[in-house]
Amino acid sequence: MPATLKTSRGIYTIASVRPLERTADAVVLTLSLERADGIEKVALRFRIATALIGATDTPEKLIDRITPWVEREFEQIREAALKSIRTDRKLHEIAFDPEHPGPYT
């Protein structure tokens, strides 16, 4: 069952839409945020330093960890993701590393 976000705009599901991409120092998780009534869908990427997570963390575990943070920062994340798609024609990427761990503190 997909994780859900309760936002001022309504209920959104958060789900992985691509397999994890692994590099030597990070994993990249591509997520979709879709409003429950289907009126809006936004995709974005999270680059997470391997130093912050377990080597065998699944997308589901990563989503569980990210969900409360995304819910708290939803409006800013949504606006940045929409702007990136419209203006830059690419997915917005949020990076978590030891200096900026986000939900991985």
Image (cartoon, rainbow, N blue to C red):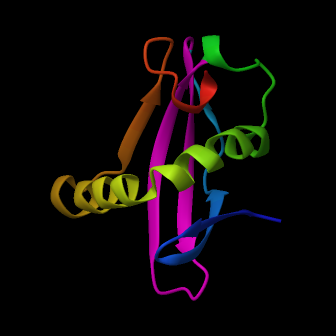
Q: Is residue 44 left or right of residue 4?
A: left
- Point out residue 39 in the picture as x, y percentages from the top left corner: 47, 87
Q: Is residue 19 above or below residue 11?
A: above
**In terms of image quadrants, where is residue 87?**
bottom left
- Total labels: the figure holds 0
At x 51%, y 51%, the residue is 72
Q: Is residue 100 above or below residue 17?
A: above
At x 45%, y 79%, the residue is 40
Q: Residue 104 versus residue 58: which sits nearer the camera? A: 104
- Point out residue 46 in the picture as x, y percentages from the top left corner: 50, 38
At x 30%, y 63%, the residue is 82
Pick the quarter of the image with the C terminus: top right
Q: Residue 28 versus residue 14: which sits nearer the camera? A: 14
Q: Main secondary structure of the magenta part?
A: strand
Q: Start and end of the magenta stretch? A: 24-49
At x 81%, y 24%, the residue is 56
- Point out residue 76 in the picture as x, y percentages from the top left corner: 34, 53
Q: Is residue 54 magenta?
A: no
Q: Is residue 3 left or right of residue 14?
A: right
Pick the quarter of the image with the N terminus: bottom right
Q: Residue 17 versus residue 73: which sits nearer the camera? A: 73
Q: Residue furthest left?
A: 87
Q: Is residue 75 left or right of residue 29?
A: left
Q: Is residue 44 left or right of residue 85?
A: right
